[in-house]
Amino acid sequence: MSEKAIMAAELAWPDFQAKVKDGKTPILIPLGSMEQHGHHMPLHVDVLLPTEFARRVATQIGGLVAPAFVYGYKSQQKCGGGNHMPGTVSLEGATLVATLRDVIKEFARHGGRNFAIVNGHYENSWFITEAVDIALRELRWDGMRDVKVVVLSYWDFVDEKTIAKLYPEGFPGWAVEHGGVLETSLMLALYPDLVHLNRAVDHPAATFPPYDVYPVKPEWTPSSGTLSSPRAASREKGEILLSVCTAGIIQGLRDEFAPH
Ligand code: ZN
Ligand code: MN
């Protein structure tokens, strides 16, 4: 079995079993969404990015990457443009909770004890928390009391210094970064063939009232689908984000999964 064998679904079962059964190998589960990301990027940005972070981190810490969740919770207007947008295909919250709960319990049944949920879609956040809580409770009922789950979103590892470097004209906040400099720069660094900057729409960062309305008001979402401009995105910024976030995630998981 090659050292590079870190994508769980690419393994034959004896190799999977060898990696998972003693519980020491951290299992990283990327979570994304199928969601519009403007005119210049594909619908799977939120899947491609956490999957690649998980792969890079797993290579460094001897982890295993589970197949990614390719659908996520419903896009919200003030952080993802809204679920009404064409191309955005989402799960009900209860479906996401139940599915992630099942997957954690299944990997635990095979021996997995250390998990990291690597999130790439903000709207998934509380549903992840709920799935983890229920999974841990039900595993305790089955006598498994040593399961640990780290929950993280990769953008939370971008520190103030990096933000200052990447946003010299001012940081709009992660909520309106949907399809903006962060995601576009990372995509330019990792999947340049999937980015069409010439189709990007330049506009000021979206502003919203301090409340939500349902049904949504489509006119609140910029017609581009992005919530801020990707104009200042670059491959170089993407490389910086890749190294800062990868290093931060590695440090966090090494701390949490250290034997004690
Ligand atoms: Zn996104
Ligand atoms: Mn998203």
Image (cartoon, rainbow, N blue to C red):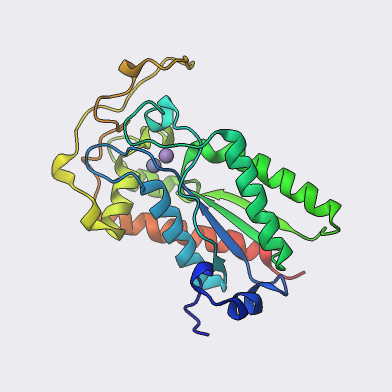
Q: Is residue 97 above or below residue 7?
A: above
Residue at figure coordinates x 41%, y 17% from the top left: 216
Kindly identify the residue that appears in the image at 47 percent across and 44 percent down.
71
Q: Is residue 166 visible?
A: no
Q: Closer to the camera, 190 or 163?
A: 190
Q: Nearer the viewer, residue 211 or 124?
A: 124
Which residue lies at the image location 36% right of the left edge and 32% below the top edge?
172
Q: Residue at x 39, y 49 (%)?
A: 162
Name the quadrant containing residue 89: top left
158, above or below 213, in the image: below
The x, y position of residue 86, in whole percent, is: 31, 31
Residue found at the far front of this picture: 13
Residue 88: image x %, image y %? 38, 35
In this picture, residue 215 sits left or right of residue 19: left
Q: Position of residue 54 (x, y in %)?
A: 49, 61
Does the rendering let one see residue 207?
yes
Q: Viewed as shown, does residue 206 lie left or right of 72? A: left
Count the marks: 0
Picture coordinates of residue 214 (x, y %)? 47, 15
Between 187 and 140, the one nearer to me in the picture = 140
Quadrant position of the C terminus in the picture: bottom right
